[in-house]
Structures are given as C-alpha cells and as structure tokens.
C-alpha cells in the first residue's frame, strides 16, 4: 500500500544572488548588439533573456545601452533579428 501524506516538492537555491537590473539590461543589450541568438524581453522591473551571453567586461566595461523602457527581440541564427527596438546601442551624450 502506498501512503503519500505530504509530498515535498520545491526548488531550493542557496548562495545565488540575482543580477541587478542594470546588469540584466547590459546582457540583453550586448547579446542583441552582437546578434547572439536568443529571446529578449524587457519591461520596467522585468527582464527575460533566453539565450544570449553576458558581456565580457575585461579589459573595459561594455558601454551599450537600450534607450527604451520596454521591448521584445528575437535573434535567430544567421544574423536575423526581429525586434521592437529601432534605436542605437550607443550611450547618449548628456
């Protein structure tokens, strides 16, 4: 006889710190700028990056920026990109 009273399912993650929003946006910007295949979604306070890569900040930090608060991009292999973002990745001069 099988008696299951309290199944214990769950994901336990310890000692992992989530990257802050600017690091997440930097990874999305870097991946889109270099046309690294993936799905990228960004909204204020909410970012998803499936695929792509994190920027290599050595010897200098990647300076690219996305200048819109919300958008979606799909980068396919073979340098095909479908995105709602139509601006530049260069930092704006103030």
Image (cartoon, grey):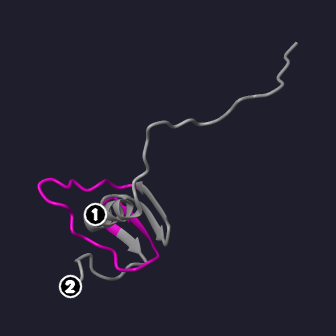
Q: Secondary structure at mark 2?
A: loop
Between residues 13 and 54, which one lies in front from this camera angle?
A: 13
Q: Can you give x and y, in whole percent of width and height, for residue 65 in the image? A: 29, 73
Q: Position of residue 42 (x, y in %)?
A: 46, 69
Q: Quadrant of residue 89?
A: bottom left
- For label 2, the crowd category at 10 Å Cα-Cα, with few meaning under 14, some 14 to 19 and many 20 or more, is few
Instruction: Name the image quarter holding the C terminus.
Output: bottom left
- At x 31%, y 53%, the residue is 53
In this rendering, the label closer to the viewer, 2 or 1: 2
Magenta range is 51-80
Give how far across and how far down residue 59 sits, in percent: 11, 55
Q: Residue furthest left?
A: 59
Q: Is residue 55 left or right of residue 48?
A: left
Q: Quadrant of the N terminus?
A: top right
Q: Secondary structure at mark 1?
A: helix
Q: CA distance from mark 2 to mark 1?
A: 19 Å
Residue for point 50% across, 68% down? 45
Which residue is denoted by mark 1 in the rendering? Answer: 30
Q: Residue furthest top?
A: 1
Residue 8 or residue 88, whichever sits in front: 8
Q: In screen coordinates, is 42 left or right of 7?
A: left
Mark 1 neighbour class, 10 Å CA radius: few under 14, some 14 to 19, many 20 or more: many
The residue that disc 2 covers is 93
Q: Mainly helix, strand or loop, the magenta region? A: loop
Query: Marks 2 and 1: CB-CB under 8 Å?
Result: no
Tell which circle, 2 or 1, labels the residue nearer the N-terminal end: 1
Residue 18, how many percent across, how many down?
43, 50
The relative height of residue 31 versus residue 82 in the rendered view (above or below) is above
Q: For the point 30% across and 54% down, which residue is it?
A: 54
| Relative side of 50 to 4, left or right | left
Q: Is residue 15 magenta?
A: no
What's the residue at 25%, 70% (across, down)? 64
């Amino acid at each position: 006889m099988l008696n299951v009273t309290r199944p214990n399912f769950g994901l336990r993650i310890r000692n992992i710190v989530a990257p802050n929003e600017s690091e997440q946006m930097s990874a999305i910007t870097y991946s889109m700028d270099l046309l690294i295949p993936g799905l990228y979604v960004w909204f204020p306070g909410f970012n998803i990056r499936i695929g792509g890569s994190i920027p290599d900040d050595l010897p200098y930090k990647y300076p690219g920026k996305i200048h819109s608060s919300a958008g979606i991009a799909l980068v396919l292999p073979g340098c095909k990109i479908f995105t709602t973002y139509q601006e530049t990745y260069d930092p704006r001069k103030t």
